[in-house]
Image (cartoon, rainbow, N blue to C red):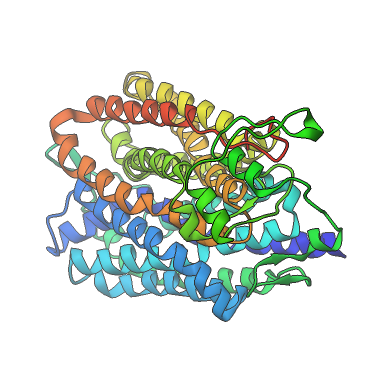
């Protein structure tokens, strides 16, 4: 019975994330709504400018995620997730009106409003699933956020099938960019937002009804009673644990080692009695409040890695189709590429989550950064090789960057504790508040200077920087022998 309920929670989380993850349909929708606004004299927006809508949604997501944790404590898991999911759906529905008025209003509804809703609802289903299956945090996170990555697989087809069922070409060339000018395509764009918003609201409601916390989980006090019931007693004292988190070398009597010394802000928190010890064997064993996390140097390393990777994700996920249009004149094929990329985006989250369970966050993230660097350095070759290589490379890129969204929540939970996971991961995710505008500036300004090739090399450099920072990230598990 417990296993069945846990499975229901995971499925509910996946359904909610299917709707939230339609943020990745932005790359598929960009040619349609950009062409609509240009053709109807709403705005002279270009593809580079349109990235600001995606950036606005990411800013909203990063701003509201920590708030989602506080909201869950006040109104409960289901109510808080539904609040966020329906706010995102409302933003999509209102875009039916805003896209006819101005680019700025579209940024507010399809961008900021949608992102705020996503941020509120995003982390809570993952935390809920981990409460049921605490020994499989990476796998559970990967499965839930697979829905986030997979949303585009379904809705890329829905969007293109509704707006451009005849696979008409974007034949209007302006400054090297191709736009649609057929009325039978563009007239359907506003109504597509009504269709999408209604579907999102219905799916998220079904998912929310499947979410529930374990019967012995107290949301207000954030206590994992499962471990208390089993009588898991930690013989290790706080000084040892603080040292493990701060990357000191300790010797424990039961391991043939004894503590050397203790330094840093965690010792201050110990004296105040502010931190506690709990968690599974795959974690650091600490339970840190958001205030304590902000004093920990490993938080800032995670934040910087996510900042660099997030900047790359904003650029690639919004402009992969615009880049493909420079040498591929087949809208249906590009929609298929986006749909299959979403499948790899979804499956990759499970794969990377499992990899972190098998090895560690540090190893998994280093592999991810190396793969992304190689892919970005060779992406330009796809324009010479044609459709097949473009298809493979885009899918590989989505497979690779998807790991960020299962690895970072897992790292936050293992490093800083399950108790305040939603809030602490929300703090890590605030990096996207900075990454999104950076990605938008790169798309709208720097791309014209560097060109596609220059941008790909620049983004590869960001992956190298992430690799270097990840190499310095060292948080030990409770046994002190392995990284988290």
Q: Nearer the viewer, residue 418 or 271?
A: 271
Residue 39 sits above or below residue 237 on the image: below
Q: Could you tell me residue 4's position as x and y percent?
A: 82, 62
**Residue in the image at 40% along x and 75% along y:** 90
Image quarter of residue 7? bottom right
Count the marks: 0
Q: Could you tell me residue 53's position as x and y percent?
A: 28, 57
Query: Residue most toward the bottom?
Result: 75
Image quarter of residue 308? top left
211 left or right of 230 in image = left
Residue 40 sits above or below residue 366 on the image: below
Q: Could you tell me residue 298's position as x and y percent?
A: 48, 41
72 left or right of 33 in image = right
Asked whether the viewer can see residue 164, the reply is: yes
**Residue in the image at 59% along x and 74% along y:** 205
Residue 243 sits above or below residue 364 on the image: below
**Residue in the image at 88% along x and 65% along y:** 1
- Which of the image's four quarters has the C terminus? top right
Residue 48 sits above or below residue 58 on the image: above
Asked whether the viewer can see residue 154, the reply is: no
């Amino acid at each position: 019975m417990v296993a069945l309920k846990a499975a229901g929670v995971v499925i509910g989380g996946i359904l909610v994330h299917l709707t939230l993850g339609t943020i990745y349909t932005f790359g598929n929708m960009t040619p349609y709504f950009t062409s609509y606004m240009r053709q109807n004299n709403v705005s002279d927006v270009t593809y580079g400018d349109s990235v600001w809508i995606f950036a606005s949604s990411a800013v909203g997501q990063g701003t509201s995620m920590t708030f989602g944790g506080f909201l869950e404590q006040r109104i409960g898991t289901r109510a808080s997730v539904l609040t966020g999911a329906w706010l995102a759906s409302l933003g999509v529905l209102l875009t039916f009106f805003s896209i006819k008025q101005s680019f700025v209003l579209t940024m507010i509804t399809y961008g900021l409003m949608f992102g705020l809703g996503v941020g509120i609802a995003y982390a809570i289903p993952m935390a809920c699933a981990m409460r049921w299956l605490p020994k499989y945090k990476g796998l559970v996170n990967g499965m839930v956020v697979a829905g986030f990555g997979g949303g585009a697989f379904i809705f890329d087809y829905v969007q293109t099938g509704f707006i451009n069922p005849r696979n008409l070409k974007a034949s209007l060339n302006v400054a090297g960019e191709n736009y649609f000018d057929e009325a039978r395509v563009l007239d359907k764009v506003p109504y597509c937002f009504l269709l999408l918003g209604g579907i999102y609201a219905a799916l998220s409601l079904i998912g929310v009804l499947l979410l529930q916390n374990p019967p012995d989980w107290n949301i207000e006090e954030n206590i994992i009673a499962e471990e208390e019931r089993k009588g898991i007693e930690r013989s290790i004292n706080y000084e040892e644990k603080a040292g493990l988190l701060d990357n000191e070398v300790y010797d424990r009597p039961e391991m043939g080692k004894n503590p050397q010394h203790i330094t840093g802000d965690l010792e201050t928190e110990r004296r105040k009695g502010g931190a506690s010890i709990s968690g599974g064997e795959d974690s650091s064993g600490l339970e840190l409040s958001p205030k304590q996390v902000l004093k920990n140097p490993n938080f800032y390393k995670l934040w910087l890695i996510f900042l660099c990777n997030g900047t790359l994700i904003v650029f690639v996920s919004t402009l992969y189709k615009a880049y493909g249009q420079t040498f591929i004149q087949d809208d249906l094929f590009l929609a298929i590429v986006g749909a299959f990329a979403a499948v790899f985006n979804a499956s990759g989250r499970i794969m990377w989550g499992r990899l972190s369970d098998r090895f560690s966050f540090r190893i998994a993230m280093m592999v991810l950064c190396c793969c992304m660097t190689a892919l970005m350095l060779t992406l330009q070759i796809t324009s010479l090789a044609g459709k097949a290589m473009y298809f493979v490379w885009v899918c590989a890129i989505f497979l690779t960057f998807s790991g960020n969204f299962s690895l970072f929540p897992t790292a936050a939970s293992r490093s800083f504790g399950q108790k305040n996971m939603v809030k602490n991961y929300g703090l890590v995710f605030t990096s996207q508040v900075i990454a999104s505008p950076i990605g938008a500036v790169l798309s709208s300004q720097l791309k014209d200077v560097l060109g596609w090739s220059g941008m790909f090399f620049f983004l590869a450099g960001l992956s190298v920087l992430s690799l270097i920072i990840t190499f310095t990230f060292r948080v030990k598990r409770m046994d002190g022998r392995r990284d988290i």
